[in-house]
Amino acid sequence: MSERFGKLPWLWLSLVIFVVDQASKFWFDNNLTMYQQIVIIPDYFSWTLLYNTGAAFSFLADAAGWQRWFFAAVAVGVSVVLVVWLKRLKPEETWLALALAMVLGGALGNLVDRVVFGHVVDFILLHWHQQWYFPAFNVADMAITGGAILLALDMFKSDKSGEKTHD
């Protein structure tokens, strides 16, 4: 029966990521004002409430509003592909399932923000002595990035070439 469902049981991880992402965004959105900083590690790390109407690194944030629905449609399409991919995975493809579940949970977390609020809530800010700032991000972004890294690493596994290794 497990082969029939592939790695769909990994959707539990997507759900956990989604819930943690939405709960953290809710907390920061309701307890901080826009641009308010709570310094955690001076000169390096702060909680800071920001809204992003664009994609990663605020790509297209200044567009006329069409990007909201464009990025939402992309997230829905990617999410469908990820669920189908999870269903088709073989039992031994656990690392790939982990990666896909992480990306899916993050994609759904940011999708809800876009559709409901028209922007993604970001609150993690890394910086260097007030001179350099990494774009603000959230739990969903961390899950997407971590999942993408695992996907890339999975591509380099030796048994992915289709060749059988003989001992």
Image (cartoon, grey):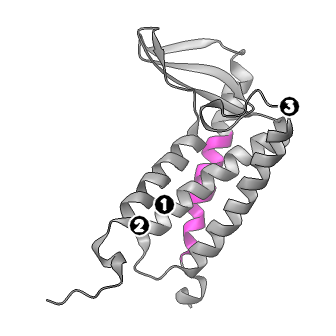
Q: Which mark is residue 95?
A: 2
Residue at the location (72% across, 14% down)?
33
Task: Decide if residue 155 is on the left or right side of residue 2.
Answer: left
Q: Is residue 8 visible?
A: no
The CA span between labels 3 and 1 is: 33 Å
The three-letter amino acid code for the residue at tag 3 is Ala
**Residues packed near mark 3 inside 10 Å, few (<14), some (14 to 19) or many (20 plus):** few
| Quadrant of the drawing holding the N terminus | bottom right
The magenta stretch is 7-22
Whether label 1 touches label 2, CB < 8 Å = yes
Name the front one of labels 2 and 3.
3
Q: Amino acid at mark 2?
A: Trp
The numbered mark at residue 99 is: 1
Q: CA distance from mark 1 to mark 2?
A: 6 Å
Instruction: Report if residue 11 lies within the magenta region.
Output: yes
Query: How would you classify the magenta stretch by its main secondary structure?
Result: helix
Q: Secondary structure at mark 1?
A: helix
Q: Quadrant of residue 91?
A: bottom left
Give percent across and percent down for residue 15. Answer: 63, 57
The residue at the point 63 percent across, 42 percent down is 21
